Image (cartoon, rainbow, N blue to C red):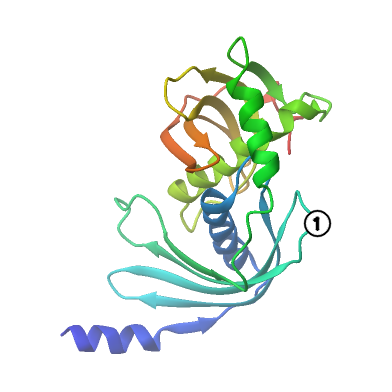
Amino acid sequence: MMSQLLTQARRIMETINPSFYPASRAAAVAENYINYKLGGPNRLYEQQKVTSASKQSIVGVGNKYYLEFVVKDALNEQPAMNCTAEVLYYTDKQQNAPNVTYTLQAEPQNYTAAKDKEFYKRIKTRCEPLVAEDIPDKFGNIAPDMEPILHLALAACGFVKWQNSTEETFYRMAVINSVKQLIRDDAALEFHYRMLIHEMVSQEMVPWLIEILWDPSEGLRVKNQQRLPKINPDENSSRHT
């Protein structure tokens, strides 16, 4: 029986136009996953172009996308890299998140180490915990010292977008409503973000609470993520990143 299912699964494969939404959505999930794994206060990756895409319908499991695309560090002058990724959306809606695997053309070097340590020292030695709102502001402005705070939030949003994505969603932009630093006795920095994440299919700005830990040695860890009740969309309709 299992061999019959595997044979049937192999047959249900179709090539899809890489510029069409199904390919873009799946590539966005892979991009979000990559940013959660590799992103931080001074490094974020963005997908440049999907060059190849196909979909396999696996009976009783879900739809699996095979993708080839280019990614580039949006914050640093580094060469673009080819990436191959597989994104499996489960038929069972009880599954927490799509399964994502990826391979980059080359393993990224830790070229942001000095800037990461500088940011860490600045925040760790503050006299008062960091508290801020509206990043960027309604005019799209970001204070230079808040840029790493935003980048770290966007990397954490990669986790939230990946965890909550389905074939019917397309999460993209995000902004910070508020951020609060919590003082800890250990090495980690802890931030609690209230974010707005744009879901392009519904055109909703979805509010989320994201609690994270970060330090240069351990990287990013998401402690908690919680979808919050909707707010008045008119309050944030002009904000974006």
Residue at 55% x, 56% y: name it.
34
Instruction: Evaluate whether residue 142 shows in this view.
Output: no
**Left or right side of 48 for 87:** left
Residue 83 % position (x, y): 61, 71
The amino acid type of the residue labelled 1 equals Glu
Q: Quick one: 116 or 3, which is closer to the camera?
A: 116
Residue at 37% x, 87% y: name it.
10
Residue at 30% x, 89% y: name it.
7
The correct choice, above or below, for 204 with respect to 95 in the image is: above
Residue 186 % position (x, y): 42, 26
Residue 70 % position (x, y): 69, 69
Choose top left, top right, bottom left or bottom right for residue 198. Answer: top right
**Left or right side of 98 for 23:** right
Q: Quick one: 137 or 186, which is closer to the camera?
A: 186
In which quadrant of the rendered image does the C terminus lie? top right
The correct choice, above or below, for 46 with respect to 203 in the image is: below
Q: Quick one: 63 or 37, which is closer to the camera?
A: 37
Residue at 50% x, 43% y: name it.
217
Residue 26 % position (x, y): 54, 63
